[in-house]
Amino acid sequence: KPNPFHHDNFHYNADEDYYVCPMGQHMRRIGTARSKTASGYRSESARYRAQNCKGCPLRCLCYKAKGDQRTIEVNHRLNEYKRKARELLTSEEGLKHRGRRCIEPEAVFGQMKFNMAYRRFRHFGKDKVTMDFAFFAIAFNIKKMCSKIAKQTKNGGNTPLFGLYMLLSRILHLENRIFWKNPRKSVA
Ligand code: SF4
């Protein structure tokens, strides 16, 4: 965002670990803030504080909190992830994939997140998350195949997989009852 008073736009000296505010004052590291989200994710933010904001002509534009020392909290890890994501999204390949985003994945994500309530992975760790999503994708594709076969049957088309369709329909119906209508919480 083009706001010169947002700490994302302050100059950061990584070697000496300090920020420089719009008035040129160094904001020194004063500690670390730790937080935990409702789902149990822990994060750490570095805290930096200006030495003295009293009498600064930019004070009213800079921050609204009380006190004469502006304090900011920066999650360096998150910023690094954002930087990497921005780099990928603006790369040549990223632009190519983004061009297809509204055509291919958006509708599927809509179905996953809103119709099937698959908003969070139910496992932790890369391998388990891959397994979690792979099972979901297999089920999703089977469901899609079933609706295609059902459509063909309705239109009187040739349906050599009708037996398979009937079997999968039953499995999906059961799955739908026990899983998608009662999405489970994350497990390790
Ligand atoms: S109010 Fe403080 S932090 Fe903001 S510009 Fe002035 S000196 Fe810098």
Image (tube, rainbow, N blue to C red):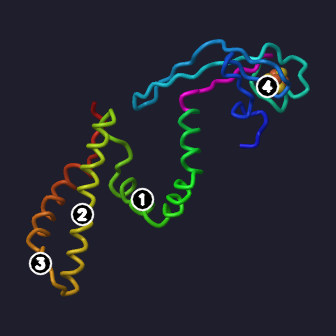
- Which mark is in front, 2 or 4? 4
Magenta-highlighted residues:
68-78
Residue 77 highlighted magenta (yes or no): yes
Q: How far apart are marks 2 and 1 (CA)?
A: 15 Å
Which residue, given by chain and number where applicable, does mark 1 sit on?
A: 110
Q: Which of 118 and 31 is in front in this view?
A: 31
Is 171 included in the stretch rendered in magenta? Answer: no
Q: Earlier in the sequence, mark 1 or mark 4?
A: 4
> What is the quadrant of residue 92 in the picture?
bottom right
Query: CA gap, disc 1 to disc 4?
Result: 42 Å
The Cα atoms of the two marked residues, 2 and 4, are separated by 55 Å
Q: Point out the image quarter for the N terminus.
A: top right
How packed is label 4: few (under 14 Cα within 10 Å), some, or many (20 or more)?
many
- The residue singled out by tag 2 in the image is 143
- Residue lying at 83% horizontally and 18% vertically, measured from the top left: 53
Residue sitting at x 84%, y 23%: 24
Q: How crowded is mark 1: few (under 14 residues within 10 Å), some or many (20 or more)?
A: few
Say if mark 4 contacts mark 3, CB within 8 Å: no
Q: Which amino acid does label 3 sit on?
A: Pro
Q: What x and y, as percent, mark residue 133?
A: 30, 47
Q: Which mark is residue 21?
A: 4
Q: Which amino acid does label 1 sit on?
A: Gly
Tag nearer the camera, 1 or 4: 4
